[in-house]
Image (tube, helix red, strand yellow):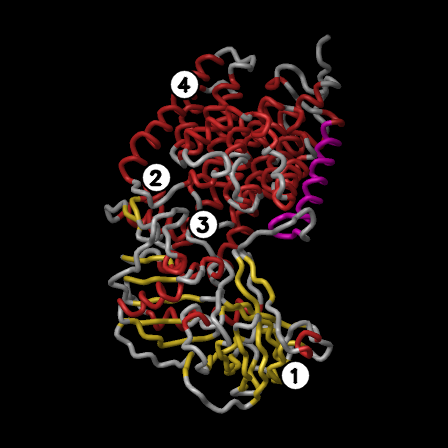
Amino acid sequence: MKPRHRAPSRLDAVCERHTPVVLSGMIGLWILVFARFLHLKYRYYLYSDIDCALFVQIVNGILHGSLVSSIRGMNWLGDHSSLILFLVAPLYAIARHPMTLTVLQCVVLGLGALPVFALARRALGPGFLPLGFAALYLLFPAVGYTALYEFHPEVLCTTTLLAMIACYRADRLVPTLVFAALSLLGKEDVALPVGAFALLTLFDRHPRRRVYAAALGGLAIVSLLVSFAVFKPAFSTGEVDYGRMYLQWGDRPSAVALNIARHPLRAIAALFVSPPYDFDTTLKLQYYAQMLLPLLFLPLLSPLTLAAAVPTLGTHFLSWRSAQHTIYYQYTATVTPFVIAAAVSGARALLARGREVPAAADAAPSAGRRGHVLMVAVLAASVVANLMFGPLVGHGMLQLVGAEEAIAPTGKDRALTRVRDRMMAELGRRDSVVAGFEFLTRLASRRDVRSMHNTIGGFHTFSTKPYPVPEGVSGAIVDVSHSRLRPYADLGTAGRFGGLLRNNRLGLVDVAGDVMLFLRDAPDSVEIWREGEQPIANPHRVVFDGQLAYLGDELISTAAPRGGLLPLRTFWRKASATDSLYVLQLSAYDAAGKAAFSTMRYLGYMLHPSGTWPDTTMVRETYRLVIPDDVAPGTYMLGMRVGRKADLDQVLSEPDDPQVRAQNNVVELGLFRVTEP
């Protein structure tokens, strides 16, 4: 039976007439909105990983003829084969600013709506539906999260992979191969989806499927050989070992592959569950819901298209790293194109059952009323999904965990920004710097910049190779209480941190909260620590775990403005040998007993943990608590809870004082007032 042809509806006719304006308007608005949040992240030091800084340094190095990354501590081609950065470098040369890369990523992602539109128009005909699918792509939560999380070359491949699929569907061989090649330049991992797509074309009805399969498969094989047979052996000497992500499968790549082959059912199960870790199982199941719900599960109607993403999904879900089991990072970049393309094919399959889409897609004048109803339903599902777990307006529903990096500043971020700006000005143009995560992006274009987390943790990033204490450093700037840095600390951190300061003659010149600035050949001009017996203004002895004795405190000032600093001293003594780092939670409680704000930090600023204290000697720590900008003026009680570090968590310590235990383990340090600035 021949399909029924319908005259274009008024909606389709209007959409077709105004397609250029509507499509460009949607893309432009999306880019502007996300670029605004990228600016907020940069302005308020909200980038909290090495990735953006790393690629800024790499691209800047390309322009200066260097392939060595001081942040990574190696030739970057031994880390990832992101040759597309050679194409990005000339664009960065026009505007040498970190936001050039993040905005470029945003623009390229936004332009991904164009191949989605072309793909949908070919499959579903002109009018409302292809514009709807372009909107669905722009609203797709995973796309938004990848746009906002640092910068990664493979994120650019979301658009090029979509273009590859669209050109294949249009039977344009050369553009298909060009976009496939561009995708393969993004990262060595992209060979998996391109190779899988090549294999799956053999099951298609495409007249030149063997040609496409051979050409695409050949490109993928060449990419793998260049990455793993040339670059990695030549440029990596143990600074990175991604095989450690699969330790539950084997201690080397060959053992991992062999165990997966021996236990295929276990490998398939690992795509959905992580026994006995219920937490990670929930993350995996939420991942599928978050990828499919915004498209009303249409991709499931095109399993062949969706299957191209399975190898990539396998590399993520067979890993123990829970970050790879969420949509908040770059890991969806090469999965999203096949999910979106499967949704288009799924819509075509669904509507074809009612013969509203003819067999020859390019002959389709309209998808008809059922197509419009379907698109409205999918758009509604997308809006609901964004309200539930979207990157901009999500309410935390269906999210066991959320994105690590904030996209808008809190009151504390605003207060800390003034502190960080001041210290960056004091740091000046010194070009050999060790820095905390949030400072790296701003410093990445300097000659020699290294990340403090390697010194704190003692190893190269994702490696068992020890990280040497940096030499020739002219300055160090770090927030030692930063939530992303704290987990790297261990009992050896004080020695490595102290070695960094001694070896490079770094003196402490500024402190606010736990943000610290050290400069070469500068005397220590700010006191944070003192040993020796001295009077205590407010004595109160509490012993924690039988190891750590709190002796009392002194509020140097009982008033501080919003956005200002509240200086205080706490007094301590080692009651017995300590076997842990100790963590303090300082909280300001209002008259109703509700915490207005809190901060977590290591006792001793990571430099002076209790394990390094002289036995029985009193020690005094001076701290300058940062008052967030958004705290209401009034009187607050400053409380302190003490905990021990255990792996990546902090475990509350047991106080020997019954009154403190009755107060939910909160030691009251005194009253203070927050005033207007």
Q: Looking at this view, name the residue that lies furthest to the top.
A: 1
Specify the amino acid type for callout 1: Thr
Residue 28 seen in the current view: no
- Name the residue tied to disc 1: 635
Neighbour class for label 2 at 10 Å: few (<14), some, many (≥20)?
few
Quarter occupied by residue 185: top left
Specify the amino acid type for callout 2: Leu
Specify the amino acid type for callout 4: Ala
308 horizontally vs 347: left or right: left
Question: Which residue occupies the foreground of this view, 502 or 16?
Answer: 502
- Name the residue tied to disc 2: 87
Q: Earlier in the sequence, mark 1 or mark 3?
A: 3
Question: Which residue occupies the foreground of this view, 400 or 150?
Answer: 400
Q: Is residue 113 above or below residue 563?
A: above
Q: Nearer the viewer, mark 1 or mark 3?
A: 1
Our reading of the magenta stretch's main secondary structure is helix
Q: Earlier in the sequence, mark 3 or mark 2?
A: 2
Numbered range of the magenta stretch: 371-394
Q: Is residue 375 above or below residue 168?
A: below
Q: Position of residue 277 (x, y in %)?
A: 62, 43
- Name the residue tied to disc 4: 215
137 horizontally vs 185: left or right: right
Measured in 3D between alpha carbons, the distance from the residue under mark 1 to the one under mark 3, in whole angstroms, is 42 Å
Question: Which residue occupies the foreground of this view, 13 or 55?
Answer: 55
Q: Position of residue 544 (x, y in %)?
A: 57, 73
Q: Earlier in the sequence, mark 1 or mark 2?
A: 2
Measured in 3D between alpha carbons, the distance from the residue under mark 3 to the one under mark 4, in whole angstroms, is 32 Å
Q: In the rendered view of the protein, which quadrant contains the C terminus?
A: bottom right
Specify the amino acid type for callout 3: Thr
Tag of residue 102: 3
Q: Nearer the viewer, mark 1 or mark 2?
A: 1
